[in-house]
Image (spheres, coloured by chain):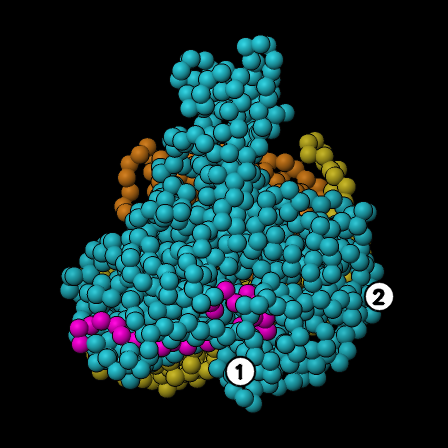
Amino acid sequence: MYAEGEQDGNPAILQITDEVESLQTFDYIKARDLPEAIALLRTAPGSVRPLAGGTDLVPALRMGQLRPRYVVDLKGIAALQELAYRPDAGLYLGAVVTFDRLLNQNEVRKLYPLLVEAARQIASPAVRNRATVGGAVCVAAAYSDWLPALLCQDAVVLVAGASERRIPLATFLCGDGHTQLAGDELLAGLWLPTPPGTAVGSYHKLRLGHGSRITLVGAAVQAHIQNGRLQDWRLALTAVGPKPFRVPEAEALLNAENPTAAVIAEAAAQAQAAAAPADDFRASAEYRRAMVGVLVRRGIEAVLARGRGVKS
Amino acid sequence: MKHEIRLYVNGHEHRLEVESHHTLLDVLRRHLGLTGTKHGCDCGECGACSIWLDDRLVLSCLILAAEADGAHVVTIEGLAASGEFSHLQEAFIEHHGMQCGFCTAGFLMAAAALLRANPRPDTATIRAGLAGNLCRCTGYHGILQAVQTASRIRRGGKSESSA
Amino acid sequence: MNPVRKTQWLGRPFPRVEAGFKVAGGIRYLDDMDFGPDLVYAAIVHSTRPHARLVKVDPAPAQALAGVLTVLTGRDVSGRLGHALADRPILAQDRVRYVGEPVAVVAAVTPELAAAAAQQVEVVYEDLPGVFDGEQALQPDAPLVHPDMDRYERRAFVHLRAGTNLAHVCSNRRGDMEVGWRTASTIIADTYQVAPIQHTAMEPHGAVAQCHPDGTITLWASTQAPFMQQAVIARALGLDPRRLHVRAAAVGGGFGGKSFVSIEALAVLLAMALPDRPVKLVLQRFEEFITTFIRPALVAHVRMGADRQGKLTALAAHYVWDAGASADALIASAWAATLAGTGPYVIPHVELTSSVVYTNHTPAAPMRGNGMAEVHWAIEQHMDRMAAALGMDPMAFRLHNLIKGGDLIQDGQVMHAIGLEQCLHQVAQAVHWQAGPSRPSAPNRRRGRGLAAMWSPVLRSTVIASTAVVRLEPESTAQDIQPVVVEVGSMDTGQGFATLAVQLVSSLLGVPPEWVRVQPVDTARSPIQEPGLSGQLTWSQGNAIVRAVQDLRSRLLSTVAQAWEEPVGALDIVDGVIYSHASRRSLPLWELVQAGVRRADGSVLYPDRRGEGRFEPAAPGESENEQVLSVAHFSTGAQAVEVEVDMETGTVHVLHIASAFDVGHALNPDLVVAQIKGGAMQALSATLCEQVRRVEGIPLNARLGDYHLATILDLPPVVEAMVVQMPQGDGPFGARSVSDHAGVGLAPAIANAVAQATGVRITDMPITPELVWRALQR
């Protein structure tokens, strides 16, 4: 099955390929550029899986949950690695930018505090060194920690395929594990408009243990300092519906009035009304709905407190 | 499908022919005989297979070997041989940061990565840096103490804030 | 025999002997061992139904794949596994009884191919009604999991009820219940539940087997109980046990999950079908959750009474254990629950019953503490409630009823000296028990303190006897090959027993610790130890080692004494040199071993180089009650915590854990402390996070990411371990073991602290945020 290679000089090839070809498995292909990747997708529609960080895909391949014919690695495509901020345009995140890279980018740390707070809470350091901002969008987990923060940026998804499409993230997400991406399309990147003022954010989530990977309920809140006060409130929830979503009713309340305790309570109630949580073995719908109220209130209060800190 | 790849593992160059479905963990353990890196869950949920890939902490069960073509890998065997983190290894022994030892290599790779990025981590930073590694025996207390001690030794014995 | 004076390596910190290898990645666990190019990989075909008749198991599609060497089904083997009760088929026969049960097993040239081929085995089921709850399984109309159980091979102490799901029932009664209730002024009854959890050793189960040309079979296994593997597998496969040779690999954690036979027989079965090829079966993580063992779910019905003076008068408790599809591993736990199911208190009128019940769940096996963590969850919460009803402080109420040395615990058995009271005082002091509630970190949080006492019986039935051999290898000279060899029949699964063995041997023999090595267990060579007892190694194997060293030392010195014509008492061994206090003569030990000792007449005497020691716990007395005779001694301790509860989300934050255990004599204080801290955190994980979730027998969270083990983020800011040393009469230097029960009191201590903080009582483990929140809504 294998022959030992040399360790020094120009090593001989250590062959560790299987003798047995009957094993049904995938072929790994590393794409050099976007057109090549898209062409590969078209060769076998429906049985090609794009690979970015691999933190979700590789275990699914190992467990036989996914059985594609081809796995196309996108990490080598320069266009997808772009991470750039332009004050006039906003933040562009190429699909294969890792969370760790995101967390170490100066403008992101300065201008997108909610993204940073949410990204820091994703999985573990070793996973954040591989997992990508685009991969997490394509996985579209109902309990994602990443999507609510992105939703609060009014993020737009850039889709590459036969033609380029720009789809608001909220529309792009269809439900747990489902997106608008067609079989011959790729998520090329995310475009996050420049925040309308200094952004202040908070992400609160509830888990079974402090190190647990599964979020039971999560609430992202962001507001922007304009003319010395917090405006343009945004609020998104996760794990209380088939996909993470914004709560415009609650946002409108916060934008309309000074967020007194009564207004905060009303916004939290709106968020609870918008939530459509499931009963599952991790938590009941009743508990999740109740926790939406608690976390939204805490999120708003945290943003108010932090906003005061920024101003002073 | 076969791939010819080149890997630099613990300073040694290897040319390998691997199948698409082989993970980096498979290749390190089964084919290069580097069994210090452990197979604990195959899902990136236990941390036992932690290694460094191009100087970054990663989980080798989540990476296809073909993806790692051209990369530099450091495993526990390489870390130990380098001697660069012998003070960390000694601190693990001193504070009983291990019992059965199965998770130990993963913890050491994560802790060394953490100390390299931040030689003076506070307790919260240590906890965050090791949050992806599971240990069923020690209860983590000895591990935390070991990393705290190692960070002090590096700075010449100055004490750090307590747990 | 010489008095043994040299104890310089005992009672003080001593580094773990294998630690240097562990921090360098140099320890080879089973999956790390090299079995050469002929190695074959196995994969299991699991039942996907909780209860079904097997209509068809067709291996042909898998068999047809190139590279698949064999596929075996229930048609190829009919044996059943079990130590006390042989109730688990090696491969499912006419029916499957749980999701995850092995239906067939595949061997192929690569692990990927074996896994892929396993998917190709065609299995047709005809579903049967299942039973998924211990108490429902006891109902008269419940579907039967083992209709033929009365035909199963079993030991005399297994009391099953054919025609029901009751695999074993045992009781312990004393006093007169009627009097007990009549003299009580306060009676409280309630039900407590413990969810099933998985042992989750970081190293999955694994086995490699090879059938040699001479017909013998070697089984390498990750096991806590190599001799039990040998006996149980040989019996199930109809082999002469001498044909099956079990070699234990380094074990990456067990906690009870590797104390029995799980999947190892499958590797042996395949090896017999593929002569001369090593066959490896290493489980994937999800299989750990569905195919091996889980800690049983428990339902505990408790009724307790006390008089006006606060003295306990009566306790009736029924412990119902959900055994899943195999009860074999729970027989001893069920007994322990009837022996210690009172908690460590003096109660005159007692009726304790344990029922081990079959269901269509993955087989259960005890986890660390042999059922005591589950039993104390109920009793130690109930003690707090009794105290509250009586208007007493929980600590004072416990002290008022606490069992002490000299108290009668069972008919014919008197409690030995214990340091339980000191343990309670120490943990109470550590968490500032007497102080008022401390200030929470946020307005929506509340703080509370809780404590629990515990005891744990060491069963004689699990420690029949221990034997150790200490021998000198004459061919070795250099110290780096460790010429003093210790052979025992039990495995160090990480608790540090090998280190303790080195300490004992070097101290008692009088040689440097670097000379001593502990041989991995090999059933063909090691002294027999059946069953496995990883929780009691210090006491039982420690005693055997002490005796073996004394035997060896005595043989060595008597030879020298004879040659030198001096009294044995004048001789000593210090740092590897034999020395005479009388004549000042000296002789390096290794010279004696290799060249003998010269007598005055020029002739040479050679010493015996092998010492053997056997420890058999003394019977505690005569009794009509078969179970009473089974307690060798009790281990005791106490745990206390301070918690902070988020009153809006129900999240419990543990701020401080204090544990104190009476270890008799801490032969290696650092290892003792490591066991106590590690045991506490493992218990914290079970108390707050863990639960094997399933609905109608279908597993829902068979992966680590959805199962929730505590991580370093859950580590409380303060974790303290304290040691009380009330010597164990028959322990080595007074020592008794601690690793097994180091977490037993933690769960009720946390529940009691949550109750103090919030005013609500959580009777079901784990204490999830939602449970607390629900209780707070009421």
Identify the residue at horizontal 48%, vertical 73% (top origin): C170
Q: Quadrant of residue C176?
A: bottom left
| Tint applied to chain B in the drawing | orange
Question: Which type of secondary structure does the marked residue at label 1 adopt?
Answer: helix
Residue B85, position in %: x, y?
46, 37
Q: Is residue C332 left or right of residue C44?
A: left
Residue that label 2 marks? C64
Q: Along the line of sight, which residue is nearer the eye, C772 or C162? A: C162
Dot 1: chain letter: C
Real-space Cα separation, disc 2 to disc 1, in angstroms: 42 Å
The magenta-colored residue range is: C308-335
C332 inside magenta stretch: yes
Residue C205, position in %: x, y?
60, 57
> Is any part of residue C243 visible from this angle?
yes
Dot 2: chain letter: C
Q: Is residue C774 left or right of residue B101?
A: left
Residue that label 1 marks? C137
Q: The chain shown in cyan is which?
A: C
Question: Which type of secondary structure does the marked residue at label 2 adopt?
Answer: loop
